[in-house]
Amino acid sequence: MGDFKEQRVCVKFCFKLGKTFTEAFQMLQQAYGEDCLSRTQYHEWYQRFKSDRTSVEDDPNSGRPSTSMDDDRVEKVLAVIRQNRPDLTPADFFLFPNLKSSLKGRRFQTVEQTEENSTRNLCAIPQNTFQDAIQNWKKRWERCIKSGGEYSEGNEFD
């Protein structure tokens, strides 16, 4: 995750000025664009300051330090993905969650019924939704590159 301390200072400033959550979040989005804190992160910090928190520093993390980001480990993971998952495409990140969501809680008696319902649900997804998914995927990897591979939360890119 990028360094959002500057934005947390802005959250605190807007809160102290008496701005509502929505007003302040819109101002932050206007100022930082796609690099803005997610709505969820912003809300968490806004609530912290509302609860009399004064520090803009991150809370200390518990447990062992992360070892997942050294260059050797990243290269090993990429090699496994290239070797075992040549089919890993943006559609995998978009289609499976959509399909899972549309079929959740439903039971089918046969494999054919499952295939038929899956196909019907996938065909019902509008073309522009697929195009949006590709654009969001592009924004996601651009954000990932910009942050040096750091974890990033949320699907809001604008």
Image: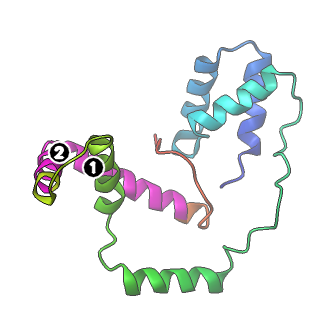
In the rendered view, would you say 69 is above or below 142?
Answer: below
Residue 26, visible in the rendered structure: yes
Residue at image mark 2? 121
Q: Which amino acid does label 2 sit on?
A: Asn
Question: Local crowd at mark 1 within 10 Å, few (<14), some, or many (≥20)?
Answer: some
Q: Which amino acid does label 1 sit on?
A: Leu
**116 in the magenta segment:** yes
Residue 134, visible in the rendered structure: no
C-alpha gap between disc 1 and disc 2: 7 Å
Q: Is the magenta stretch mostly helix, strand or loop?
A: helix
- Residue nearer the viewer, 154 or 109: 109
Q: Quadrant of residue 138?
A: bottom left
Q: What element carries label 2?
A: helix
Side (left or right) of 45 relative to 94: right
In the rendered view, would you say 24 is above or below 118?
Answer: above
Residue 17 spot, x, y in % from top left: 77, 15
Residue 54 spot, x, y in % from top left: 89, 29
Side (left or right) of 118 relative to 38: left
Residue at image mark 1? 99
In the rendered view, would you say 57 is above or below 76?
Answer: above
Q: Are marks 1 and 2 in contact (CB under 8 Å)?
A: yes
Residue 77 spot, x, y in % from top left: 53, 80
- Residue numbers of the magenta segment: 115-144
Q: Residue at x 78, y 25 (%)?
A: 13
